Amino acid sequence: MAQDDQIYRNLQIHLNSMPVGFPSTESGADIKVLKAFFLPDEALLATFLEYIPISLKKIYSRTKNLGMSLEQTEQKLDSMVQKRIIYEDVNPRTNIKFYGNLPYAIGFFETRVNRLTKKLAEAFDEYDLPFIKEFLGETTGIPQMRTVPINVAITLKNNLMSYNNARVILENVEGPYAVAPCVFNLGSL
């Protein structure tokens, strides 16, 4: 196996250990997807991140042997945030940065809604069925989305929110917040 392929395999294994997994495939579709998103150095760096964001200093302590300075590590992580393949959280009081891995879905897959390339679309299409089986729990027996019974009746109220009501809420909520189109509704854009 080529060194780059091993880096991507290591990232696949790492992402698969997270709450929403990233299963391997016999066809190699999983590696094609990762290659479509991550450069080899980004894939390597992502293997040091977790699902819950961790501080830049902690990441740097884990990655010192990669030969990057703290500043270079931060620049690379910030670049990955800009590419929307990982996420950043900043403590507003201390301004300390924390970085974490995004899952495939709902995560870095959705960040490409308006930036799909033929290569990405083909990789998504090939990986779709194995991932959906994992997501629905067909491979693990544990679906990622499931009903949790609470034995309480819930009264259904269908309320349509007007534009003005939504606007008032957004004007009175401290940001940041975002709205993004769903990747599965591309036909309606």
Image (tube, rainbow, N blue to C red):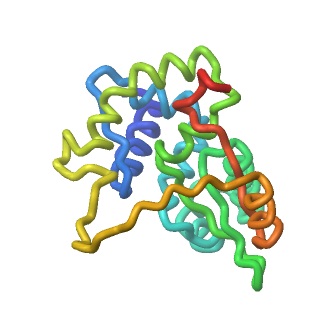
Between 104 and 79, the residue placed more toward the observer is 104
Query: Which residue sits at x=42%, y=27%?
Result: 2
Horizontal side of 76 relative to 19 (left or right) equals: right
Above or below, 101 against 152 in this view is above
Query: Which residue sits at x=33%, y=52%?
Result: 145
- Which quadrant: the C terminus? top right
Above or below, 24 against 156 in this view is above
Above or below, 8 against 99 in this view is above
Residue 149, percent from left and from top: 23, 66
Horizontal side of 81 relative to 138 (left or right) equals: right
- Which quadrant: the N terminus? top left
Query: Which residue sits at x=38%, y=66%?
Result: 155
Between 47 and 105, the residue placed more toward the observer is 105
Query: Which residue sits at x=32%, y=43%?
Result: 135
Q: Which residue lies furthest to the bottom in this view?
A: 93
Horizontal side of 19 relative to 37 (left or right) equals: left
Above or below, 160 against 4 in this view is below
Residue 164, percent from left and from top: 80, 57
Q: In which quarter of the image is residue 169?
A: bottom right
Q: Residue furthest right?
A: 171
Residue 113, percent from left and from top: 64, 32
Number of callouts: 0
Q: In which quarter of the image is residue 64?
A: bottom right
Residue 165, percent from left and from top: 75, 61
Between 109 and 48, the residue placed more toward the observer is 109
